[in-house]
């Protein structure tokens, strides 16, 4: 079997890049992997773990000669990065990214690129609440979705190769319009994250309930919120700032619905509550059937 | 070792009662366990699984001769149940419950009881998103907290025995004032549940994003919400109706905070977002240190 890419450059060496590197090694379909991170300490950690074949000392060294370059940095850093690497990208190379919003990444990156580079934005829907080069593992993308949001006129051969790459990493792959992607993710990820962050902040802030009470008695529901709210602050700041409109729209709908449920509680309308809670149960069933979670009980805590 | 109770009666045979029965059997500190549920089908299922020594055909048969009776039914059903069993409770028996709110249970149950019964409300902070007699397992309470909310003048010996009982089931045990309990749980459980229900309902309702998109792309955050929002509708309806004031107070604080974060998104105030997200991360650390979750990554999904 011939290799998918001769040389893949990963820019940024956090959870996603290190997982990509681990999964590439498992796939045996890439010649070599070069990594780069701006922080000396991160590069040193990556060298120590050894998930890349080499860690470059400069951005230019990292991308030179790569036929696939993946930007794995917070969205706010992507424009500047694209400007710096653009002159050094190889003829016919593919440039991709892993950003959680796509319209903003396209607007930040595209203006810097010349015609001879294939820019194909991507978003692997996978992650954990941990971050940094030590957090990565090869199985992160297994059976998860990677969404490509190619622009009109994208080279079909280059796109097919990137699809094959993500499949080799264990992902399912789908294509989506960038704006629709941003709306779907606002619903399935961005709004839920903001809500979880908010609730955890409220709990921390409430004078009459001590932090230790919150922490000890978190088993029923709150624990899952804290897991979400432990995600990387810089990454998430950039997600919200770069998907402002869709996130605010969904939060608006959320608030409307929350007020209706609050009113049902206040007026004692048990039927409204029961009907609502019955409907949401069905969605859970769909997620299990789609293979995106197991039906193991107890909110993910193992037993037995 | 002498037995803690000669005969324990479990009224209601759902997730919690069946788990108590399994855990009692594991503990070997109770003489016999009698179960009862109003539904014939539930009694039949319980007989088939066999987690009780016997399943009674009537409520009166179940509680007669029991030295511990535990009400394991939705909160809205407890008052009527207490009225029915009160004349049949043995002299010196302990009556307890597992309701998620405590003030409402006390108000509904206490008026029916005579002086010769020890009424000691309890709330095991354990559960899963599943329900019914098939959902129970012996380890449900291991290392979880059970909160007792004894009333002034409660018999110390009776209370000590109930504490020992919950410890024998694997729980940590703490005591709390009923109203404070209801506030703490509004923060750590009731408000998070309502918020999760709301968000899942919004996703289901949004015309421009299909249900299959929501289901397929749920891996990053939303999945945990659906797990919470799959919990038993009747139980949760009763929780909100019976802990109205505390839940509405916390939701009020939540909305206030959410609006501040929404404004930060709208105005592009990245520092506000970053600071907030950094603070919430620390709470997660506390929960792991308190043994109420592991730091296994990927939102509870196993790997490797």
Image (tube, coloured by chain):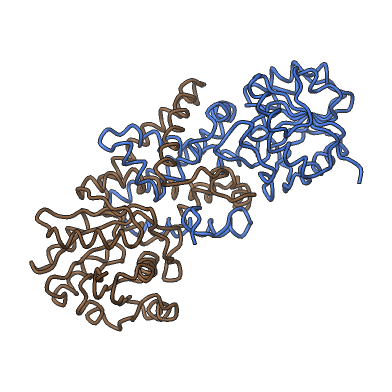
Chain colours: A brown, B blue
Q: Is residue B48 above or below residue B168?
A: above
Q: Is residue B170 above or below residue B123?
A: below
Q: B134 and B272: which one is in front?
A: B134
Q: Residue at x 30, y 66 (%)?
A: A72
| Number of numbered tags placed on the structure image | 0
**Residue B293 place in picture, x, y as percent:** 58, 54
Q: A195 and A34: which one is in front?
A: A34
The picture quadrant where one finds residue B225 is top left
**Residue B259 place in picture, x, y as percent:** 37, 43
**Residue B59 place in picture, x, y as percent:** 75, 19
In the displayed orientation, state which residue is furthest to the front: A1
Q: A198 and A75: which one is in front?
A: A75
**Residue B53 place in picture, x, y as percent:** 79, 31
In the displayed orientation, state which residue is furthest to the right: B2
Q: Residue at x 74, y 20 (%)?
A: B82
Name the side, left or right, on which B19 lies relative to B222.
right
Name the side, left or right, on which A38 lies relative to B9.
left
Q: Is residue B195 above or below residue A160?
A: above
């Amino acid at each position: 079997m011939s290799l998918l890419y001769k040389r893949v450059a990963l820019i940024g060496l956090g959870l996603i890049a290190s997982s990509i590197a681990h999964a590439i090694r498992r796939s045996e379909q890439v010649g070599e992997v070069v990594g780069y991170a701006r922080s000396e300490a991160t590069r040193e950690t990556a060298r120590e773990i050894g998930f890349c074949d080499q860690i470059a000392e400069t951005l230019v060294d990292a991308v030179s000669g790569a036929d696939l370059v993946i930007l794995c940095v917070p969205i706010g850093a992507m424009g500047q990065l694209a400007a710096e690497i653009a002159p050094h990208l190889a003829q016919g190379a593919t440039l991709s990214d892993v950003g959680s919003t796509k319209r903003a990444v396209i607007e930040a990156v595209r203006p810097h690129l010349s015609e001879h580079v294939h820019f194909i934005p991507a978003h692997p829907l996978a992650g954990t609440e941990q971050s940094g080069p030590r957090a990565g593992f090869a199985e992160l993308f297994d059976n998860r979705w990677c969404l490509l949001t190619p622009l009109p006129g994208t080279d079909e051969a280059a796109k097919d190769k990137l699809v094959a790459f993500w499949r080799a990493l264990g992902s399912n792959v789908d294509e989506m319009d960038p704006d629709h992607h941003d709306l779907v993710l606002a619903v399935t990820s961005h709004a839920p994250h903001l809500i979880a962050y908010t609730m955890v902040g409220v709990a921390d802030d409430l004078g009459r309930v001590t932090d230790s009470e919150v922490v000890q008695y978190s088993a029923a529901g709150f624990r899952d919120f804290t897991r979400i709210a432990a995600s990387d602050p810089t990454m998430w700041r950039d997600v919200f700032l770069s998907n402002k409109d869709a996130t605010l729209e969904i939060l608006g709908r959320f608030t409307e619905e929350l007020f209706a449920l609050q009113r049902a509680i206040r007026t004692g309308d048990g039927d409204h509550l029961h009907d609502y809670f019955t409907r949401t149960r069905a969605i859970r069933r769909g997620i299990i059937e789609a293979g995106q979670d197991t039906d193991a009980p107890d909110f993910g805590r193992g037993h037995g």
